Amino acid sequence: RAFRSIKDFSEVDFGIIKGAIKLPYKPIPTLEEATAKLAKLDAQEQLIEVDFREHAVLQETIKMHKENAKFDDHMHIDQVMFKFNSTVFVPFPFELFSEIALRLRTYSPFQNTLCTCNTNGSHFYLPTQTEMARGGYEIEIFLYATLYKLQNNTDDTIIKENLRLMREYLANK
């Protein structure tokens, strides 16, 4: 029934918007800083869940320093968006806070901007700077789940970078 109810058929203007997005990491603690933080955690009588995550990250940081490993300074995302007429689908390899998708939709040059989460990978939660101050489980995961920690303003960066790719696509069309 739904198919029969369609009255307007037209050619689909399909496009692919792609490019590299770099999200800066916070600086990695030095060997001395990581060792001191780990000693402070080890001195506590009882560790909570966040402490266990941070403990594991500090151990990995110390191990990498001792192996003279090269630390990355940013997360690289090969972004690929799909455009159908006036609609663009924007994938994110994170679980976004809804404000990020709403802000991207507000400033997008496309009539309809649909954001998908945990697409092309799944890293962790991506909160807004506003939510960082409130704390909570998602913020703790963002701050302590991995060795590489994204900057607190990553929400702004990822919006600006996606808008840049959209505008470049439209300028070169």
Image (cartoon, rainbow, N blue to C red):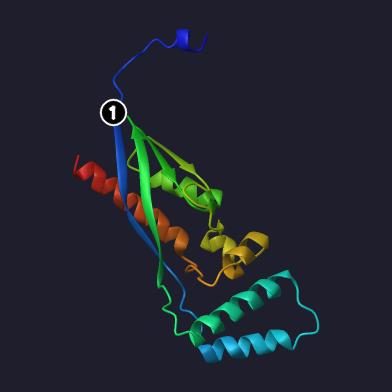
**Residue 45 relative to residue 61: left or right:** right
Percent from the top left, x then y, of residue 19? 31, 52
Above or below, comparing residue 21 to residue 40 in the picture: above
Front residue of 23 and 170: 23
Q: What is the secondary structure assignment of the residue under circle 1?
A: loop
Above or below, comparing residue 4 to residue 152 in the picture: above
**Residue 102 relative to residue 19: left or right:** right
| Residue at x 56% of width, y 58% of height | 124
Front residue of 112 and 42: 42
| Residue at x 61% of width, y 91% of height | 36
- The single residue placed furthest to the right in the displayed view is 45
Q: Amino acid at mark 1?
A: Asp
Quadrant for residue 48, please give it: bottom right
Quarter of the C terminus within the rendering: top left
Task: Please tell me how many numbered marks the rendered image carries.
Answer: 1
Percent from the top left, x then y, of residue 138? 63, 60
Above or below, comparing residue 141 to residue 63 in the picture: above
**Residue 145 relative to residue 50: left or right:** left
Percent from the top left, x then y, of residue 116? 49, 43
- The single residue placed furthest to the left in the displayed view is 172
Mark 1 lies on residue: 13
| Residue at x 52% of width, y 46% of height | 117
Above or below, comparing residue 98 to residue 56 in the picture: above
Crowd tier of the residue under label 1, counting other residues whose Cα lies within 10 Å: few below 14, some 14–19, many 20 or above: few
Quadrant for residue 10, please give it: top left
- The single residue placed furthest to the front in the displayed view is 67
Percent from the top left, x then y, of residue 60? 57, 78
| Residue at x 52% of width, y 89% of height | 31
